[in-house]
Amino acid sequence: MRKGVGTSPAPRSWRGEDRREEPRRPQAQPAPARPGSRAMDEEGCAERSRRRCAASAFMLAAATGFLAIAALTLRPISPGVRAAEPADALAVLKAGFARPTFIPHPVDNPPTAAKIALGKRIFEDVELSATGTIACASCHDAKLGFADGEPKGKGVTGRRLVRHTPSLWNVAWSPLLFWDGRASSLEDQIRFPIEHPDEMGSTLANAVDRFSRHDSYVRAFAEAFPTDGPRISPRTIAQALAAYERTLVSPPTRFDRWVAGDPGALTPSELAGFAIFSGKGRCSSCHAGFAFTDHGFYDIGLPGSDKGRGGQIGLSAADHAFKTPTLRELAWTAPYMHDGSLATLDDVVRHYESGGVTRSTRSRDLPQGLVLSERERSDLVAFLEVLSSETPPQPSRETWVNAAMPAARAPPADTTLVSQANKLFHPQYVRVRSGELLTVVNDDTRTHNVRIYDPRFDYNSGAQEPRETVTIRFPGPGTFEAFCAIHPSMRLTVVVE
Ligand code: HEC
Ligand code: HEC
């Protein structure tokens, strides 16, 4: 077994003294260079037309989330034959992993330095819990990659929680929060841990009460919320915490240097691992984009009775499905999965090789019958490790982290027909006339859903199987936001005129 980070579980108690010592991440051993190449798997195009595949590759350049399809379309990119490759094929593949250029902050909670600093202070404050002993940071510990290093953590009661504590890297991009997606924004998410009897066992009203008694908090809230109504309220607490959490952007690693154009940034072993990741391992069909997640919910075959997303939205097609986690900084956040059941990255790769539990809900995007040699397995693990910092990670300080969000958006398309191929509504922004029906056709290989949460229009298509079509009649003029409750990165804006 590979010796290195992420392969040795390092359970630490959240109360433990060992929190104070800086964990060190042993340097990954660069594997010796070796000749030979591994072709990327092209089977993904067998069931699709060539034209469709080419179109996906094109869309990838603009958007994210399609990496797999693009990858499967591309010619082999394994390191040994890179010189012979068309440079643009590799460039398209890399573009799918490029770092973002802004943090998506909601318009009603714009970030300011004062608000972020206040959010960080609240995040680290044990006053938020009933017992005055547990902070958000007790479970999401900056020294442990904003996770807790345990299969299942503990809060105020000392009882084990039901699910594993996820890291908070790159949560700004996650449309839905929690393993089962039950919170629809970071602002909304905050009350869950505060009110959970086993986590913090308190209430936001209690927090308002406590903070109001500290002069320095009163001043900090006034600075962070200079014009808004009551300064210290459940809303401002949530907004400050959420604004801070959005700054937890995983820092660049050698992988990003490689994507940015330094061909020597990765070792031959890591490059071979990347070829498996985006080729026959099919990992990138779900772990796509800079954060290595499409934010969708999938059953990857882990045993257990937890229904995950299916239980949450009442769709059995999404039973045992959990949110695809980011793969950034994994070396610091073992153990893995919603149940904390896999201790090392080697165990994770072996899980994908075994295929896990056979169930009707098991995702068809998983690799089928994946067989890896010892060398391939260690290459893949080496690649996963290069997505982690080599010293304890700190949130990124890249200049774009403080950049403003671009406002402009292309005009809507005039059409009443929307496709769902490749986990994307297409087009994503349409205009229909009042009274017209909108048709959404599932021309993908996966089960989708169309959900609109709106006080004017609450719509749920239920499970929409491949080739099924739904028609939607809107209640009247207005702008409506639709999404897929299983693949929530799928967003559709409909302007009804
Ligand atoms: C006692 C441990 C504990 C404490 C304290 C705690 N959390 Fe968590 N956190 C968890 C667990 C466990 C989950 C996953 C639960 C689930 O998905 O069902 C989680 C999930 C999250 C998520 C979702 C991440 C994602 O990718 O979906 C966010 C965000 C979060 N916590 C923020 C906070 C904030 C903010 C606080 C303080 C107000 C906090 N947590 C306090 C254990 C904790
Ligand atoms: C069908 C989508 C899908 C594919 C394909 C896929 N994953 Fe995952 N991955 C997930 C989901 C969903 C989870 C969380 C599952 C859970 O906890 O139940 C996950 C979890 C993980 C984790 C644990 C991360 C953590 O913080 O707990 C790692 C590591 C990982 N995947 C690596 C890979 C690798 C390597 C491959 C290719 C061999 C791969 N994945 C293929 C969806 C996918």
Image (cartoon, rainbow, N blue to C red):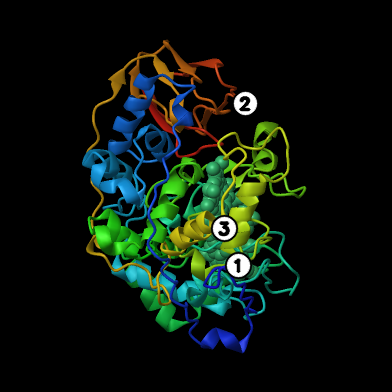
In this rendering, the label closer to the viewer, 3 or 2? 3
Q: Indicate the position of residue 171 as horizontal and vertical percent values.
A: 45, 56
State the separation of the CA atoms marked 3 and 1: 9 Å
Q: Is residue 192 left or right of residue 228?
A: right
Mark 2 closeness class: few <14, some 14–19, many ≥20 residues within 10 Å = some
Does residue 497 appear anywhere in the picture?
A: no
* Residue at 43 percent of width and 82 percent of height: 215
Q: Specify whether tag 1 is near ligand 2 (CB below 8 Å).
A: no
Of callouts 3 and 2, the N-terminal one: 3
The residue type indicated by label 2 comes to Ala
Residue where numbered disc 2 is placed: 463
Total marks in image = 3
* Residue at 64 percent of width and 62 percent of height: 164
Question: Which numbered dot is residue 78?
Answer: none
Disc 1, SS: loop
In this rendering, the label closer to the viewer, 3 or 1? 3
Q: Indicate the position of residue 408 as horizontal and vertical percent values.
A: 22, 39
* Residue at 49 percent of width and 41 percent of height: 280
Q: Indicate the position of residue 56 as horizontal and vertical percent values.
A: 36, 29
**Which residue appears farthest toward the front when viewing the image?**
35
The residue type indicated by label 1 comes to Met
Question: Which numbered dot is residue 1?
Answer: 1
The residue type indicated by label 3 comes to Glu
Does residue 65 appear anywhere in the picture?
A: yes
* Residue at 29 percent of width and 63 percent of height: 265
Mark 1 closeness class: few <14, some 14–19, many ≥20 residues within 10 Å = few
Q: Indicate the position of residue 11 as horizontal and vertical percent values.
A: 64, 75
Residue where numbered disc 3 is placed: 374
State the separation of the CA atoms marked 3 and 2: 40 Å
